Each structure stands twice: as structure tokens, then as C-alpha cells.
Image (spheres, helix red, strand yellow):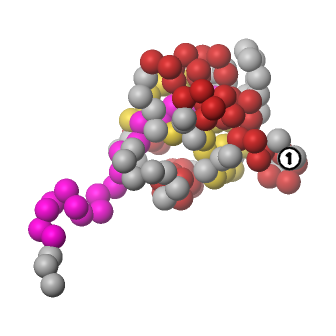
Amino acid sequence: MQMNSDPSATAAPRVLRVLIVEDESLVSLFLQGVLRDLGHEVSGIAPSLRTALAFAAGTPTDLAIVDVGLAGDGGDGIDAAVALRARHGIPALLMTGAPLASLGERIKDAQPLGFLAKPYTEADVERALTAAVAQLPSQI
């Protein structure tokens, strides 16, 4: 039996480039701090679908955390998650303060990697990201 002594083969935590799609600035700033504390990079903060698509077009991003209740320019958070995946191949982790049952059938269109219930803690974000990462291709 041969052991792999390559240090890069160890299961180090994966650093993600995360786009935050949230129209409430205090929420997005808090989430940005949590992501950085967890060792991830924030590729941008977008308050609307259109801004999110602009960031995604020009900034490498592994995952978007999208507020389902997004208001504003271009559509809601489900529209944003669908557009990010379709146009840029960026999957989404959806966050909401609403009960999941109330989101309806449209939620399936977004193909979310998971959900983050508001209000959330740093530990909640870490758990949701860990579950999401398990579904991402390993080359990201």
C-alpha cells in the first residue's frame, strides 16, 4: 500500500469566491464579514439581479448566496438564481426568512444547492456552505 505524502492532497477547507445577492445593505455587510471570517472571498455584493449578472460576467465566482426576497431591478431572488446558473454557470445557495413551503414550485427552477434561513449565525452559514460545497464539481 502506497501512501500519498503530497501536502496538497490533504482535505484543506475549500476557499470559495462568493457573490452576495442581497438588497439590504446591513444584511449583505454582515454576511460579507461572516464569509471572510470563514476564510472565503467575496467576489461582489449585488443589490439586484442586473447588478449580480454584471458582477458574474466580469468576476470569477464559485457560488452565489441569493436572497429569495430580492427586490428591485430585473426580478426577485429566484429569477436571479436561475439567471446566474443559466448565463454564467454559477449555482446558488438561497437565503430566506420565509418558510420553505411558502416558496412554491418556482424554487425548483433555481436548482439551489441549499437554503440559509434568516436570521442566521456564522455557524449556520458555515454548515450551509459545507453542504453546498459537497455538491460542487471538485475543480472549482
The residue nearer to you, when weighing 136 against 123, is: 136
Q: Can you tell which quarter of the image residue 84 is in?
A: top right
Q: Residue at x 50, y 20 (%)?
A: 57
Q: Looking at the picture, how far across and down is residue 124, in whole percent?
A: 56, 55
Image quarter of the C terminus:
top left
Count of numbered circles in the view: 1
The residue nearer to you, when weighing 122 against 113, is: 113
Q: Looking at the picture, how far across and down is residue 31, in whole percent?
A: 53, 37
Q: Is 42 contained in the magenta span? A: no
Left or right, 109 with respect to 5, comes to: right
Image quarter of the N terminus:
bottom left
The residue nearer to you, when weighing 41 against 87, is: 87
Q: Residue at x 77, y 47 (%)?
A: 108
Chain part drawn in magenta = 4-22
Q: Is residue 108 above or below residue 10?
A: above
Left or right, 34 with respect to 76, comes to: left
Q: Is residue 4 above or below residue 78?
A: below
Tell me the element at label 1: loop
Residue located farthest toward the bottom when viewing the structure as drawn = 1
Q: Looking at the picture, how far across and down is residue 21, in whole percent?
A: 61, 29
Q: Which residue is mark 1?
A: 105
Q: Is 19 contained in the magenta span? A: yes
Q: Residue at x 74, y 17 (%)?
A: 74
Q: Residues within 10 Å of mark 1 (few under 14, many from 20)?
A: few
Q: Residue at x 63, y 32 (%)?
A: 86
Q: Is residue 56 visible?
A: yes
Left or right, 119 with respect to 124, comes to: right
What is the three-letter code of the residue carrying label 1?
A: Glu
Q: Is residue 21 visible?
A: no
